[in-house]
Image (cartoon, rainbow, N blue to C red):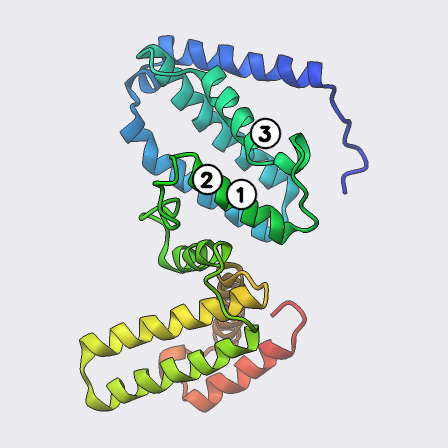
Amino acid sequence: MNTEYKAHSNEEKVKEFERLLNIMTRLRAECPWDKEQTFDSLRTNTIEETYELADAILSGDMPEIRKELGDLLLHIVFYAQMGSETNDFDIYDVCNGLCEKLIYRHPHIFGDVVAHDSEMVVQNWEKLKLKEKGGNRTVLAGVPDALPALIKAHRMQDKARSVGFDWEHRDQVWEKVKEEIDEFQAEINRMDKDKMEDEFGDVMFSLVNAARLYDINPENALERTNRKFAARFNYLESQTIAKGKDLKNMTLAEMDEIWEEAKKKKDY
C-alpha cells in the first residue's frame, strides 16, 4: 500500500475526466495521427494494451498498473469520441449504459433480491443476462469467439455451471480427466495425428474444468508456470555462459544439474 497516496474527491475525479475528454477532442481535431484512426485501426492496439495491463497485474507493479489503466482508458475515450463524430454514441451513452446495466444486474444491491454469497450473485447475473434479450440469448452467447482458447474454455464452463450444468461433487471430475488421458493415449498408440489433437484438446478441457471446480484460474496458473520456467531457463543459460560453456554442447545431465540448482533458489 502506498502510504503517500492522496485520495481524491469525486469532484476532482470528474474534473480530471473532463480534462481528458477535452484533450481527446482536441487531438482528434488537430493531431494528424489521431485524426486518421478508425475503430478497426485501433482494435489491435487495444488488445495489446489489455495484455500489457494483464502483465502489470501479474507482476503486482502498482505504478505500472496505474499507467496501463490510463492507456486502456485512453482507448475507451478514443472510441467514444469517434462514435460522437458519427452521431452514433458518445461517452455519456457509454457510461449511462454501463450504470443502467450494473443497477439491473445487481438487484440484491439496488432492489429486493436476496443473494447470500457470490455463487448466488453469479447465478442471478446469468439469468438476468438471458432475460435481456427476451430469453432468446443462448447461455454461451456472451463468450467471445476471439478469446484465447484456455480462457474461452474456462468461461464456457463457468457459463454452463450458472444454469446447473455441472458435476454434483467436484471430485467426480478426476474420473473424467483420467478417461480423457486414456483416450489420448489410445490415439497416440494409433499415431492418428488429427485424432491425437482432438483428444489432447479434450484432456486440456477436462483439466480446465478441474481447475474451475477447485477455484483455480487456469490462465493464471499456466502463466505462473510459464514465468517459473522462463526464470529457471534463464538461470540455466546464464550459469552456462558463466562457466564458458554452450547449451548446445552440454549433456542433458549437465543441464539438469543446473536446473535443480535453480529450483532450490527462492526466486526460481
Q: Is residue 139 left or right of residue 232?
A: left
- Residue 42 versus residue 116 in the image, above or below: above
- Picture quadrant where residue 89 is located: top left
Percent x, y of residue 174: 49, 80
- Could you tell me how many numbered marks the image carries? 3
124 or 197: nearer the eye? 124
Q: Is residue 266 left or right of residue 64?
A: right
Q: Is residue 229 visible?
A: no
Percent x, y of residue 51: 45, 45
Q: Residues within 10 Å of mark 1 (few under 14, many from 20)?
A: some
- Mark 2 or mark 3, which has the lower sequence index? 3
- Residue 36 versus residue 147 in the image, above or below: above
Quadrant housing the C terminus: bottom right
The residue under the point 59% across, 40% down is: 65
The residue under the point 48% across, 32% down is: 72
The answer for how far apart the CA atoms under marks 1 and 2 are is 6 Å
Q: Mark 1 touching mark 3, by CB under 8 A?
A: no
The amino acid pointed to by label 1 is Trp
Q: Secondary structure at mark 1?
A: helix
The answer for how far apart the CA atoms under marks 1 and 3 are is 11 Å
Percent x, y of residue 63: 64, 38
The amino acid pointed to by label 2 is Lys
Q: Is residue 82 left or right of residue 102?
A: left
Q: Mark 1 touching mark 2, by CB under 8 A?
A: yes
Percent x, y of residue 257: 53, 86
Disc 3 designates what residue? 103
The residue under the point 57% across, 52% down is: 58
- Residue 238 versus residue 50 in the image, above or below: below
Disc 1 designates what residue? 125
The residue under the point 57% across, 83% down is: 260
Disc 2 designates what residue? 129
186 or 236: nearer the eye? 186
